[in-house]
Image (cartoon, rainbow, N blue to C red):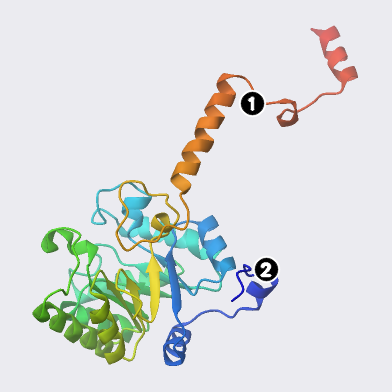
Amino acid sequence: MSTIAPTAFTVSKRKKVTTLVFREKKERGEPITMLTAYDYPTATAMDQAGVDSILVGDSLGMVVLGYENTLPVTMEEMLHHCRAVARGAKIALLIGDMPFMSYQVSVEEAVRNAGRFLQQGNMDAVKLEGGRERADAIRAITGAGIPVVGHLGLTPQSVHQLGGFRAQGKTAAAARRLLEDALLLEEAGCFSLVLESVPARLAELVSGRIQIPTIGIGAGIGCDGQVLVTHDLLGLFDRFTPKFVKKYANLHAEMQRAFGEYIEDVHTKAFPAAEHSVDMAEDEWQALLKDI
């Protein structure tokens, strides 16, 4: 298999990824790739690399804004970052993550806020967490013409209810309930389903029982696609790294090294050097000196 990155030409030939593409990929057994992004340059790089989908996740609360968890993230913060991502990515399917309390209060509020992601955030779809308790909201949102991604397993917005960031579906009863919820979310109209931190064979079982594609994060190889938080993948978030993350770089350490080198260069006056400075013609300089 070639390891050559897509060129600008090949990327420009790609067609916009849609919910139909997700369904066709599952039917053909082609893995779906998804990553999180929160800004223009990252989204641009992902789009050029050829990722299928970009999730503007409420994980930005932790990895970008420095919150302890995702609960403080607001609609305005999400929409701000969605717009930045949408300016950078034109091909990937863009999914906005509905933040805590933007869809739990009422079905009407859920539909209104979901619509804002498309109208004001320039997203293609939304994602929300929860199982059977979210079915009515999902039916109403999809009924309004807004594509929805479900999210089962470890649902970070329920971190206090779950007792922490813990794997889910590890008992027969919990696994059975998760499978039932997956079927209910499919029936409610979700076009895809994120499975987070659940046993690999349970995720594979769910993926085989539902017709919509599953996107795994810490859910094994049996899902129809995979998603990671980009700051984890790049080694940019140093507070902790989930067990299921594969680090493809260690940019936090590289940034520290670069910052330290810059500080040293300024202290020793190695920077800025002549090549980093603006020059002035000698005759103009001499003319200035005569006048002052």
Give whichever of discs 2 and 1 has the lower sequence position.
2
271 or 79: nearer the viewer? 271
Q: Which mark is residue 7?
A: none
Q: Is residue 270 above or below residue 290?
A: below
Q: Is residue 186 above or below residue 130?
A: below
Amino acid on which the number 2 mark rests in the picture: Ala
Q: As drawn, is 64 to the left or to the right of 137?
A: right
Category of crowding for the residue at label 1, using alpha-carbon neighbours closer than 10 angstroms: few (below 14), some (14–19), many (at least 20): some
Q: Residue furthest front?
A: 1
Residue at 23 percent of width and 88 percent of height: 183
Q: Image quadrant of residue 267?
A: top right
Give residue 212's position: percent from left, percent from top: 34, 87
Q: Which residue bears the numbered disc 1?
A: 271
Q: Is residue 251 visible?
A: yes
Q: At 87% from the left edge and 13% from the top edge, which residue is drawn?
A: 286
Q: What quarter of the picture does the N terminus occupy?
A: bottom right
What's the amino acid at mark 1? Phe
Q: Is residue 87 visible?
A: no
**Which residue is at a point 22% across and 67% down the rendered structure image?**
155
Up-down relation of residue 192 to residue 73 (above or below): below
Front residue of this view, candidates 145 and 172:
172
- Answer yes or no: do the residues labelled 2 and 1 have beta carbons within 8 Å? no
Q: CA distance from mark 2 to mark 1?
A: 35 Å
Q: Residue furthest left?
A: 173
Q: Nearer the viewer, residue 237 or 54?
A: 237
Looking at the rendered structure, the secondary structure element under dot 2 is: helix
Residue 54 x, y percent position in the rendering: 45, 68
**In this rendering, is residue 265 above or below 16?**
above
Q: Nearer the viewer, residue 38 or 167?
A: 167
Q: Would you name the residue on which mark 2 appears?
A: 8
Is residue 149 left or right of 38 when viewed as pictured?
A: left
Identity of the residue drawn at 67% across and 68% down: 8
